[in-house]
Image (cartoon, rainbow, N blue to C red):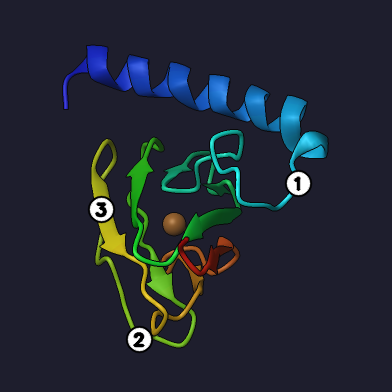
Amino acid sequence: MNGQASRWLAGTAAASAAALTLTAAAITPGPGRATQIDGRQVEIVDFAYAPSVATLRFGDAVTWTNLDIVPHTVTATNGSWDSGEIAPGESWSMIVTETVALDYYCVYHPGMQARLDAKPSG
Ligand SMILES: [Cu+2]
């Protein structure tokens, strides 16, 4: 990925973090998904997954993008799935179904832990 794209992604991450801060209190579960934070994009930045709890629907594809300067992984806590190494600037995607384990971490940095909060679609 070129430097321009990296800067764009970094800017997006900052904007997303700001949006999370501003809107977290206003989010309510319900059928109207348009106003919910889109959990289908998870950023890995500063040795953390953002959002740490990604709200989505079963059947959604989730994409993790590594915005750090070191490699990370996205690995099920129970070991049932694993991204392998995600290099800086790279992304990895997975479709979340009812059978997918929802808790995950980074095998290189076990303190990095996060969760998918998947709900039935429709
Ligand atoms: Cu890591």
Residue 24: x and y in percent read 75, 37
Q: Secondary structure at mark 3?
A: strand
In this rendered view, identify the residue nearer to me: 93 or 78. Answer: 93
Residue 106: x and y in percent read 45, 65
In this rendered view, identify the residue nearer to me: 118 or 111. Answer: 118
Which residue has dot 1 on it? 28
Nearer-N-terminus badge (3/2): 2
**Residue for point 50% across, 74% down:** 102
CA gap, disc 3 and disc 2: 16 Å
Q: Is mark 2 within 8 Å of ligand 1?
A: no
Q: Is residue 24 above or below residue 22?
A: below
- Which label sits in the foreground, 3 or 1? 1
Which residue has dot 2 on it? 80
Nearer-N-terminus badge (3/1): 1
Q: Is residue 51 above or below residue 21?
A: below
In this rendered view, identify the residue nearer to me: 76 or 107. Answer: 76
